[in-house]
Amino acid sequence: MYDFFGREWVKAFNGEDFLNNISKERRLDAVQIANYRKQLFNV
């Protein structure tokens, strides 16, 4: 869910503790991936 919908969905459905555990893995959420792709396209 984190990869597809982002942080807020994970927080709403799984709770903040679960979100904090995922965030420690330094994974990109959907919004961050979209921004990253835009940056790559503009290079």
Image: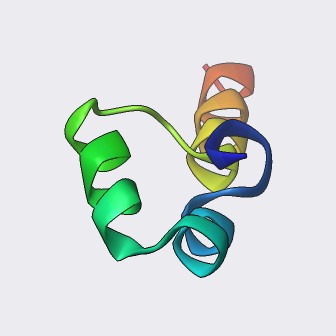
- The x, y position of residue 38, in whole percent, is 71, 37
Residue 24 is left or right of residue 4, and the answer is left
Residue 18 is left or right of residue 24, and the answer is right
Residue 5 is drawn in which quadrant? bottom right
Residue drawn at (58%, 45%), measured in percent from left and top?
29
**Residue at the extreme bottom of the image, as rendered:** 12
Residue sitting nearer the eye, 40 or 10:
10
- The x, y position of residue 11, in whole percent, is 52, 73
Residue sitting nearer the eye, 38 or 23:
23
Residue drawn at (39%, 59%), measured in percent from left and top?
19
Residue drawn at (46%, 73%), measured in percent from left and top?
15
Residue sitting nearer the eye, 10 or 3:
10
Residue 10, above or below 39: below
Residue 35 is left or right of residue 5, and the answer is left
Residue 5, above or below 21: below
- The x, y position of residue 16, in whole percent, is 36, 74
Residue 9 is drawn in which quadrant? bottom right
Q: Quadrant of the C terminus?
A: top right
